Image (cartoon, rainbow, N blue to C red):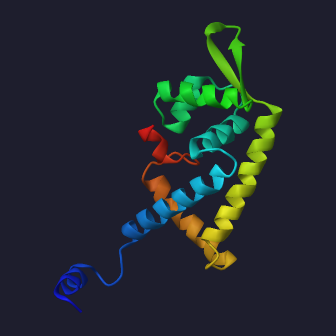
Amino acid sequence: MNESNEYVSTMQPRTPGAAFLLAQVGAHAAARFAERLARLQLQPQHAGALRILSAKEGLTQRELADRLGMFPSRAVALVDDLEQRGLVQRHEDPEDRRSYALRLTEKGRRTLAEVGRVAREHQEALCKALEPRERDQLADLLLRIAEDQGLTPGVHPGYRRL
């Protein structure tokens, strides 16, 4: 072992801590999911918006931005893109003509079904080293950590940078 490798090996713990492993696996998982979505010509924020709108149609752009944890101006650009792709429609709010309710189109629903297929494929590839019982246990533990940290269920905090 050369001197520089020896220094590094003495500075690192033999087993990385849970926080490091969560960050490492999380970054890897996010990158692989983005690659899989790219096959559908989508980005993770597209998938997140479609999923949120399928659960609660009629949200305004501001409400969608809040749920995604994204700046409202970025949500406008995201919705513009989704609308140009034919995945989402804006409907004028009869009570406030400055506000638009967002709804998935039929193409948006089909695309979301494809996103679901990609997400299942992604989960299977990522967790293939674990037995089904271990996968459930891991998900339960991660959910407890997410709740303790005040994370919004089902929303990736990476959107906050957008």
- Please state the horizontal and vertical placement of residue 143, each as a whole percent of the image: 54, 59
- Residue 83 lies in quadrant: top right
Residue 119 occupies quadrant: bottom right
Could you say where residue 40 lies in the image, as x and y percent from the top left?
Answer: 70, 48
Residue at horizontal 69 percent and vertical 75 percent from the top = 132
81 or 25, which lies in front?
Answer: 81
Q: In this view, does 58 lie to the left or right of 149?
A: right
Against 45, residue 34 (above or below) is below
Residue 143 visible from this viewpoint: no
| 39 on left or right of 140 | right
Residue 18 in view, yes or no: yes
Whole-percent x, y for residue 118 in the image: 70, 56
* Quadrant, the C terminus: top left
The residue drawn where x is 65% and y is 17% is 100
| Residue at the farthest bottom position | 1
Query: Which residue shows up at 66% across the image and 31% down it?
Result: 82
- Would you place residue 70 above or below residue 20 in this image? above
Residue 26 image point, x, y percent = 48, 61
Rendered residue at 23%/84% (across/down): 5
Is 160 drawn above or below residue 18 in the view shown?
above
What is the quadrant of the N terminus in the image?
Answer: bottom left
Front-most of residues 127 and 35: 35
Left of 64 or right of it: where is 124? right
